[in-house]
Image (cartoon, rainbow, N blue to C red):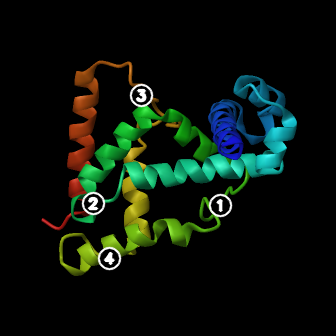
Amino acid sequence: MRDKQLTARGMATRARIMDAATAEFAEHGIAGARIERIVNTAQTNKAQLYAYFGNKDGLFDAIFGASLERIVEVVPIDAPDLADWAVRLYDEYLRRPDLIRLATWARLERRPSGHLVADADRLDDVKLRAIAEAQAAGRLRPGAPFDVMALVIGMSMAWSPVSNVYAATADEPDEVHTARRELLRECVHRAVTIH
């Protein structure tokens, strides 16, 4: 019984560390994040953090990996309807702006060119296969499936927290989001769907 309590307690501590670190890294980036703030927020200590994650880089890797997995699970691709996928991505950016900020810090501080993650093939495999199948069925315009995916993701991020033009928030009026969703849906549909 005691081992199960410790395991449950350890899992709760690990989860608190992950939550605190997600907020810290999203706000301050990898270089600017402070372990002291993370352990204070998580109500734990450095020894526990290092036991779970090894070091600051290991902690960032864990939360960034979890954020990528979350987007794949919460917003699965629908290759025959990439316009709908783009809108669902837009909505997820509104719900979880921290996830986009983490990706941006990873791009700025770790991988300024090429794929954002080292195992991009594993993360993108399902999406790229789905796009290639939709292209083969004549639903999507031809082109490298990766480039089609990148275009749709880029369009979905037009109003994201890292937009160079305007960063939307969930606090804006519903009608504003509805108009953006309609515009995004129409533009993605016209860009990638065979009419």
The residue beneath circle 4 is: 132
Residue at the bottom extreme of this rendering: 136
Give the quadrant of the N terminus: top right
Mark 1 touches mark 4? (CB < 8 Å)? no
Where is 158 relative to 169, above or below? below
Please name which of the two marks, 1 or 4, marks the residue nearer to the observer.
Answer: 4
Q: Does label 1 or label 2 sit earlier along the sequence? A: 2
The residue beneath circle 1 is: 113
| Of 54 and 182, the residue lying toward us | 54
Locate residue 23 relative to residue 98 in the image: left or right: right
Position of residue 45 measured from the top left corner of the image (x, y, whole percent) = 83, 31
Q: Residue 137's quadrant in the figure?
A: bottom left
Position of residue 72 measured from the top left corner of the image (x, y, whole percent) = 43, 55
Secondary structure beneath label 1: loop
| Of 37 and 49, the residue lying toward us | 49
Disc tally is 4
Q: Distance of mark 1 from mark 3, alpha carbons? A: 26 Å
For badge 1, the amino acid type reads Ser
Mark 2 touches mark 3? (CB < 8 Å)? no
Q: Residue 150's quadrant in the figure?
A: bottom left
Q: Distance of mark 4 from mark 2, alpha carbons? A: 12 Å
Position of residue 37 measured from the top left corner of the image (x, y, whole percent) = 78, 26
Please name which of the two marks, 1 or 2, marks the residue nearer to the observer.
Answer: 2
The residue beneath circle 3 is: 168
- Which mark, by number, is residue 78? 2
Locate residue 89 relative to residue 184 in the image: left or right: right
Secondary structure beneath label 3: loop
For badge 3, the amino acid type reads Ala
